Image (cartoon, rainbow, N blue to C red):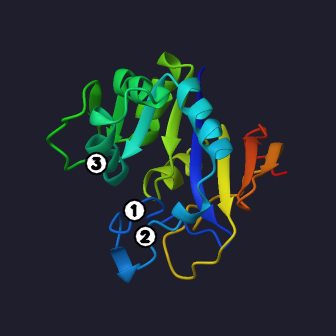
C-alpha cells in the first residue's frame, strides 16, 4: 500500500490560503496572497524539490490544479521539478472541471476516500499539496500518512485553515528543520491505531 503525503505552506496561526500569488485565492476578502514570497530560501527550494521528486503521483484540488496547470507545462526545463510534475500521473478532485489541459491528468469525483484508497494500491507515494477541501475529507477517512508542514513566521488572522474540524489523530514528529528566513519545517507521520482505540 502506498503513502499519501500532504505538503502545506502554513502561517504560525494555521492559515494556508493563497501562499504563492497575490490573486491566488481572494475568497472571504483575503488580501494577503503571496505571503510566502518574502521567505524564499534556496535550501527550502531544495527540500521542496526533493518532495516533488519522491512522489510518483499527484493529487490536487481544483484550485491548486488550475494554478499548477497554468505554470508547470511551460516552466523552466532546467528545474528538475518541471519534468517530474509534467510526466507523473495527476488526479484532480473536482465535480465541475471539464478541461484537463495538463497532460497525464485524470479527473476524479464521487467517493474520494474510495478513489484514494484505490490509488494507494497503484502508487508508492502520492503527493497532495495543501487543499482545504481535499485534505479534511481524507483525514476523516484516515488516509493521510504524512504531513510536511512549512510553518512561516507570521500571523495572518482570518483565512482558510487546513485543520478546521479535523478528527483526533496522533502524530509522530520525524523531522524538524529551521531555515535562515525563519521558516520551520515539521514532518509528521501518522501513528497507526487499532480501530476504536484512542491515543
Which numbered circle lies on residue 21? 1
Q: Earlier in the sequence, mark 3 or mark 2?
A: 2
Q: Position of residue 57 (x, y in %)?
A: 45, 26
Crowd tier of the residue under label 2, counting other residues whose Cα lies within 10 Å: few below 14, some 14–19, many 20 or above: some
Q: Position of residue 175 (x, y in %)?
A: 81, 42
Disc 2 is placed on an element classified as loop
- Are the residues flagged by discs 1 and 2 in contact, CB closer than 8 Å? yes
* Residue that carries the numbered disc 2 in the rendered image: 33
Disc 3 is placed on an element classified as helix
103 left or right, relative to 49: left
Q: Is residue 120 visible?
A: yes
- Are the residues flagged by discs 3 and 2 in contact, CB closer than 8 Å? no
* Residue that carries the numbered disc 3 in the rendered image: 66
124 left or right, relative to 174: left
In the rendered image of this protein, does residue 33 appear above or below residue 114?
Answer: below
In the rendered image of this protein, does residue 23 appear above or below residue 80?
Answer: below
Amino acid at each position: 500500500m502506498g503513502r499519501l503525503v500532504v505538503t502545506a505552506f502554513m502561517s504560525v496561526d494555521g492559515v494556508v490560503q493563497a501562499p504563492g500569488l497575490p490573486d491566488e485565492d481572494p475568497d472571504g476578502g483575503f488580501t494577503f496572497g503571496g505571503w510566502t514570497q518574502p521567505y524564499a530560501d534556496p535550501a527550502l527550494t531544495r527540500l521542496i524539490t526533493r518532495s516533488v521528486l519522491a512522489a510518483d503521483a499527484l493529487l490536487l484540488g481544483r484550485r491548486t490544479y488550475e494554478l499548477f496547470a497554468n505554470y508547470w507545462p511551460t516552466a523552466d526545463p532546467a528545474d528538475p521539478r518541471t519534468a517530474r510534475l509534467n510526466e507523473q500521473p495527476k488526479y484532480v478532485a473536482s465535480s465541475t472541471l471539464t478541461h484537463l489541459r495538463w497532460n497525464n491528468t485524470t479527473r476524479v469525483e464521487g467517493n474520494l476516500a474510495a478513489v484514494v484508497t484505490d490509488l494507494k494500491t497503484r502508487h508508492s507515494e502520492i503527493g497532495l499539496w495543501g487543499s482545504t477541501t481535499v485534505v479534511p475529507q481524507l483525514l476523516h477517512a484516515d488516509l493521510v500518512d504524512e504531513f510536511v508542514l512549512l510553518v512561516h513566521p507570521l500571523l495572518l488572522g482570518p483565512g482558510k485553515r487546513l485543520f478546521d474540524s479535523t478528527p483526533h489523530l496522533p502524530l509522530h514528529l520525524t523531522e524538524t528543520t529551521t531555515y535562515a528566513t525563519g521558516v520551520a519545517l515539521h514532518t509528521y507521520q501518522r501513528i497507526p491505531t487499532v480501530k476504536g482505540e484512542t491515543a
